[in-house]
Image (cartoon, helix red, strand yellow):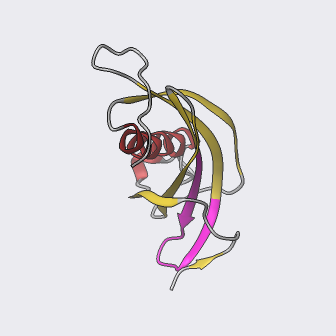
Amino acid sequence: MVHYADGRPIGDLTLRTLAMPSDANAAGDIFGGWVMGQMDLACGIRAAERAKGRVVTAAVKEMSFAKAMKIGDTLCIYTHVERVGRTSMTLKVEAWAQRYLSDLMEKVTHADFVMVALDGEGKPKAVPAEG
C-alpha cells in the first residue's frame, strides 16, 4: 500500500514513468527539466481529452521543486482541469515521486499549466462544453 508523505495528490493520475540514468546528472539527481517535460505531456493528455482535439501549452505558472528525484524513482503526474475558458484551460498539476523499491510517495513539485485548444489550421478554437 502506498504511503503519501505530503498529503494526497490533487486530480487524477495521468502519467506514470520511471526515472532512468539518461534523465539524471552525474550525482544521480533527475533533471528538473525532465520532470517539467513529463508534466507538460500529462497536461497535453488531459487537455486534449477535454478539448476533444489538439492542444498546446501557452504558459506555465510558477514552479519550484520541494524534493529531488533519483534514478529508479517512479514519477507520477496528477492533473485536474481547474478552469475552462473559451479557448483555453488551466490545469493544476502535481508531480510525485514513488521512491525506488518503496511504497513512499513524496510530492516533488506542482504548477498551473495553461493549455489552448487548436483547430486543424493551428488557430485557437472553442473548448466544447462537457458532456
Residue at screen point 57% across, 61% down: 96
Q: Is 59 or 18 nearer to us in this picture?
A: 59
Q: Indicate whether 104 appears above or below 37.
A: below
Please indicate whether residue 40 sits to the left or right of residue 49 in the image.
right
- Asked if the magenta segment contains residue 99, the reply would be yes
Q: Indicate whether 60 appears above or below 13.
A: above
**Numbered marks: total:** 0
Q: Which residues are magenta?
A: 92-107
- Asked if the magenta segment contains residue 120, the reply would be no
Residue 18 in view in this figure = no
Residue at screen point 49% across, 71% down: 100
Residue at screen point 72% across, 54% down: 66
Please indicate whether residue 106 sits to the left or right of residue 75 in the image.
right
**Relative image position of residue 83 (x, y in whole percent):** 60, 41
Q: Indicate whether 11 appears above or below 35.
A: below
**Relative image position of residue 20 (x, y in whole percent):** 40, 54
Residue at screen point 45% across, 64% down: 72
What is the quadrant of residue 41 in the picture? top left
Task: Point out the residue furthest to the bottom here.
Answer: 1
Q: Is 128 or 13 nearer to us in this picture?
A: 128
**Relative image position of residue 23 (x, y in whole percent):** 45, 46
Secondary structure predominantly adopted by residues drawn in magenta:
strand
Residue 116 in view in this figure = yes
Task: Point out the residue furthest to the left here.
Answer: 120
**Relative image position of residue 19 (x, y in whole percent):** 44, 56
